[in-house]
Amino acid sequence: MTIPETRTTTQSISEVLVNVRPALERVLGSYDVPPEDAEDVLQDTYLTLLYKWEKVQCPEAWLIGTLRKKCIMYWRKRRKRIIDAMDAAILELLSEPERPSQERQDLGRDFDRVLGRLPERCQKLLRLRYGLGLGPSEVAVEMGYQPSSIRKITSRCLTVLSRELAAVGFLEREHD
Amino acid sequence: MTESMKQSATTNRRPVAGHPSDESLALFMRGALPRDEARDVVRHLLSGCGACRKTTGAWWPSELTRDREAGKVVPFEERERTPSPDYQPMFSRVARTLAERERDFAAERRATPDLRTELIELSHTERLERVASDARFASWALVESLLEESREHASGQPADAVALAELATAISERLDEGRYSAAAVHDLRARAWGQLGSSLRIQNRVWDAQKALDTARQHLERGSGDPAERCRLLVLQAALYGELKRFDEAFALLDRVIGLAERCGEEHLRGSALIRKARLAAQRDDQETAVELLRQGVALIDPDEDPRLVLVAGHNLVHMLADTGRYREARERLDETRALHLQFGGRIDHVRFRWLEAKVYQGLGWLEQAAELYEEVRHAFIEEGLGYDVALVSLELAAVHSQEGKHPEVRRLAEEMLPLFSSQKAHQEALAALLFFRDAARKEAATVPLIREVADYLRRWRSNPGLRFRGGDARC
């Protein structure tokens, strides 16, 4: 494996792109970014380089490193969209007053069953969130967490719940 | 499994009564299903339907996976590879878009001087109003140009530097994220807010500076993740901590920058962090460490990237070498520093260099040359009306004359210095120090230690105007 050379003053941006293209393809491939989304990811990376051209010392290394970060961010955003959708849907489902009582009971039972498979800390937090409808700061008080850290903990628990619902398989252990 | 493979694996499946269709599940897992339908999908998943959970499981976004046998997290790149999809057509399309943007950007740069001219004629408030109401000013190149000018004004005209950085932040907030790329725009906004924070710090508005740096950090979090941008902001934060005398935090931040910059091969950035550390070490009165850090930093910084930094660092290195008594080494660096001043410095910079030169000559015992230079510098400061500097350089010159036993010269300087200094609304304590010196000069009792004592007091008084003068300790 070679180390990309430092930019010479005569090298143009298009020359850099030609040289580094195989490496960028490998990055996109290793992160499984679908071609239809890869276009946005790549374009964003290229444009950022264009506007920073004067400041970037080694464009090849910069492009590879930045694309790698953007791929990670791409999947992070995709996961967040799913988690947000799950969260919003559960909040709505559990707060629908017009739902017939049998359906409400079924829903409650299903929800309890799913929660029962989660780490204890997440069970408690999600019951406060969905069952009692508490906001993040109220959950923090109830569970004895700093208000500044509750967002992170909630986000972890929502991820665990979403993975469980989507049957991703291996459930990451949440440590109390 | 790639997205297209997952897609082909599911598209053949039929929607079963009571189950969401495969298309709905796929859209849900891409976060693109309408809210009502998403609720139905989640309700169905809560029921524990194995078939649908299998489908959604295949659509779960890639992430770090845990190798059960090894019991460790496996990075993306070490996972079992599947054949990569064909990115070929996409690369060609993106290259074409980039070429178009490159042309647009070149045109934007050409238009920048005219936009600047339009703004120059306006007051600061009018400028802010104009850039808020006229879309032509929402230009990346204009922001960069304003930031560069703000940096240039930072030491000489800090109020202008703040105004320019404020204008740059205002314009940066109006840049079209779709046109430039959101990540790049956030990086630029971070840079603009960082520059504003830095200018405010130089104006001693430390709390406003901290607020600006906090805003910069928020933008950075939404930016490209470029470590160089992060390092720049850390350097500015460290400078602010230094100002607040929070040295340990400042050193810790700079060590992070040095480590990051080293890993990224950002030599200039590493050099500027070392120079910043040197400045902090000097503030802590650790001159030896400061000299060593400065020496390392100067060797790494790039004149093309920040000529002013090269000049200031080179100058300060000679200054510190002289302060620590290494006059020979300081003299060896004079020619190089002079060249930097001639190339990058302004008139006052050059006068300060001549002052430094005089100090080195004095240290080497070349008193005649030192006196000549001090006199030259003194006249230049008188012309500029810089009373405080006149007083300091006069004291240095007086020390040379005192060393040579030229008491009438010492007395002349003492008499001339007072009216110049008192016209600058000087503090009573500082005036008292100079009166003390004048009285000693009149009695031919202004010895070198006494003169140094007065000069040291004046230097400390500048950063601490409440400091009282307790003269006479050095009288012998």
Image (spheres, coloured by chain):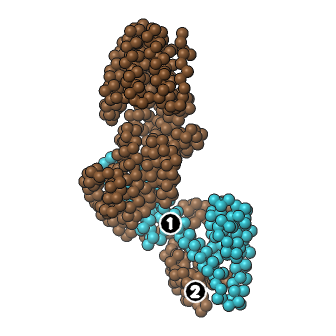
- Left/right placement of residue B317 relative to residue A135 reads left
Residue sitting nearer the eye, B130 or B415: B415
Per the image, label 1 sits on a secondary structure element best described as helix
The amino acid at mark 2 is Pro
Q: Position of residue B301 (x, y in %)?
A: 42, 38
x and y percent of residue B209 in the render?
Answer: 49, 47
Report whether B220 appears left or right of B94: right
Q: In this figure, which residue is indicated by the disc labeled 2? A: B20
Viewer can see residue A77:
yes
Please rate how many residues cluster around mark 1, counting C-alpha atoms within 10 Å: few if below 14, some from 14 to 19, many from 20. Answer: many
How far from the left and from the top, in percent, is residue B204? Answer: 48, 41
Picture residue at 43% right of the left edge, 10% below the top: B442
Describe the element under mark 2 as helix, strand or loop.
Answer: loop
Q: Quick one: B289 or B66, which is closer to the camera?
A: B289
The brown one among the chains is: B
Q: Which residue is mark 1?
A: A74
Q: Is residue B160 above or below residue B342?
A: below
Q: Label 2 marks which chain's residue? A: B
Q: Quadrant of the N terminus of chain B?
A: bottom right
Dividing the picture into quadrants, the one containing residue B361 is top left
